[in-house]
Image (cartoon, grey):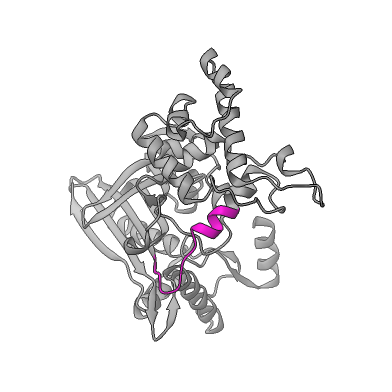
Amino acid sequence: MSDANERAKSAGVTILCEMGLDPGIDHMMAMKMINQAHFRGGKIKSFVSYCGGLPSPADANNPLGYKFSWSPAGALRAGRNPAVYISEGQTIMVAGEDLYDSATCFRLPHLPAFALERLPNRDSLVYGDLYGITNEASTIFRATLRYEGFSEIMSALAKLGYFNNEIRPMLSQGSGINHSAPSFNMFLQELLREALKNNQTQKDVTEAGHSTEQMDIANILVRVGCCKSSTSANKVAFCIRYLGLDDESKIPEACKSAFDIICSRMEERLKYFPNEQDMVLLHHEVQVTYDDGRPSELHKATLLEFGKNENDKSESAMARTVGIPAAIGAQLLLEGKITSTGVLRPLDPEIYLPALEILKASGIHMHEEVESI
């Protein structure tokens, strides 16, 4: 973006980027809160931001509590990205393979019905520079929100091998009159046998040579380390059945890897049906301190939007919170309200102040509160 920025400035052109939900509304609300604190003489001690696109509680009716309105591949790959953030002055790094295991429970006091969890979202450190708080904030943390239990299941599926991109011999035997495509259950049994073989006990190595079809899936998941408890393993086993990973139906020929299979099953089984609603939840917390003896403050801002179904027409919360900010950005440019040139994010008051006002007039607004701590 830096190269494009210089060229755009030289040409006297304005290119407004990251004008959606996340990034977009999150930028604008963060800068409003931070700049207000600085104007009052405060320093930012902590900045945390959480965002999630989820099914509404009524429609989170599957073991993962999650649904896709697009191909699952991108979301699954994002779940394997490493993350880094600062917590009380300490830099925390999370490897991609450990991301799901790093999830922690999250509750909002003013929304007590939501049982959520948070997963670190990529590189939080860059936001210290973007927001101008690197030298004052001892905590900078951004996270993705999911319903509680999501990461526990996804971690087990990953450890079992379903997120592996390698071409599998079982799936790449070609097609033709003499070729019989394997079933989903056949592939599941192969993964279970491999997991048992990779286990270090001689008993498991011996059992791995026999059929796993009559063995309890949950029991195997615990024994091979995919799950830590039988309770967790039963949830994962239920999800495996829900996704049809134990079906006797044939795997599509287009699937050449375990990743292809899980994407195919999730796309089919975790989709939104007509009249189902999605939900967007964005939450910022900014802790502000003062050098003049005033008490520290915790500033909170929450955006909660639900999809709408009216007159046989559906409008998702995600489409609205991504599309309307983009339209507002175009409007501000066309009306000449943005005078800066170059490649811009909505970080300056000339952009975020009018944009947030138009968002509010459009029915999208943040609930804000401040408390002394």
State left or right for residue 31 relative to residue 341.
left
Quick check: 279 above or below 207? Answer: below
As for residue 268 lying within the magenta part, the answer is yes
Q: Quadrant of the N terminus?
A: bottom right
Tag count in the figure? Answer: 0
Q: Is residue 41 visible?
A: yes
**Residue 168 in view, yes or no:** no
Tell me if residue 299 comes above or below residue 119 in the rendering: below
Image coords of residue 30 (percent x, y) = 39, 58
316 or 181: nearer the viewer: 181
For the point 47% across and 34% down, which residue is it? 217
Q: Is residue 159 left or right of residue 28?
A: right
Q: Indicate left or right for 148 with 124 as reference.
A: left
Q: Is 350 colored magenta in this rendering?
A: no
Q: Toward which corner of the image does residue 312 lie, by quadrant?
A: bottom left
Percent coordinates x, y for residue 177 in the rendering: 82, 52
> Quick check: 201 above or below 329?
above
Residue 90: percent from the left, percent from the top? 41, 32
Residue farthest toward the top in the current orientation of the protein: 202
Residue 137 picture location, percent across and down: 37, 43
Q: Residue at x 37, y 59 (%)?
A: 60
The residue located at (36%, 69%) in the rendering is 306
Find the magenta span and give its range: 264-278
Give the residue at the far bottom of this rendering. Answer: 311
The image quarter containing residue 2 is bottom right
Is residue 96 placed above or below 126 in the rendered structure? above
Which residue is at the front of the view, 160 or 121?
160
